[in-house]
Image (cartoon, helix red, strand yellow):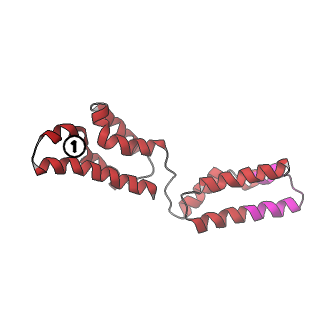
Amino acid sequence: MTAEDDLVARYLAQLQDELRNVSRPVRDRVVREIAFRIAAERKDGDDVEAILADIGDPLDIAADVRERHGVRERSNWREVAAVVLLPFGGVVIPIAGWFVALYFLWSSPVWTVREKLAATLVLPFGTLGPLLLIGRSSLYAFALAAPLAVAAYLAVRLRE
């Protein structure tokens, strides 16, 4: 394998990785089309670096494909931190942890405004979780279960 082949393989691998939250048929089609284009232009004797520069950055290609197919942005640590800190942040870091979670929640492009509002309005009870365990009323149990249910819903939506 030549250095040019290695460069092409890394480019296609990065493109495939950036498209991992796109359906497999779409991802495979896009990567295959780009690979065919690269191979065709290499047969013409063009420089591999020039070909790849002409095709564009894999990040930009992936963002365009996600936009055309209505796929949300890739998730990262910010979303995971929001899901974990929303129900438990106020317990781990009293009060401030929940506000940090809200920052992560609202700065993320992954969830819709409706989902963010639901999490913001339901999850304040998560900061009171340990105190609610002291009470014996079913209302207290609901108040504790609701934040956990919303966090679980956000986690499921994150995986989608």
Magenta region includes residue 111: no
Residue segment shown in magenta: 35-52
Magenta segment: does it hold 46? Answer: yes
Residue 75 on image: x %, y %: 49, 49
* In this rendering, position of residue 40 left or right of residue 13: right
Q: Quadrant of the C terminus?
A: bottom left
Determine the residue positioned at 17% across, 49% down: 141
Question: Does residue 118 show up?
Answer: no
Overall secondary structure of the magenta stretch?
helix
* Image coordinates for residue 151, horizontal then vertical, percent: 33, 50
> Which residue appears at 38% of the width and 39% of the height?
103
According to the image, label 1 marks what residue?
125
Q: Quadrant of residue 112?
A: bottom left
Amino acid type of the residue that numbered disc 1 sits on in the rendered structure: Phe
Residue located 39% across and 56% down the image: 156
Considering every residue shown, the one lying at the far left of the view is: 137
Residue 47 in picture, x, y percent from top left: 86, 52
Viewed as shown, does residue 138 lie left or right of 21? left
The image shows residue 27, relative to residue 151, as above or below, that is: below
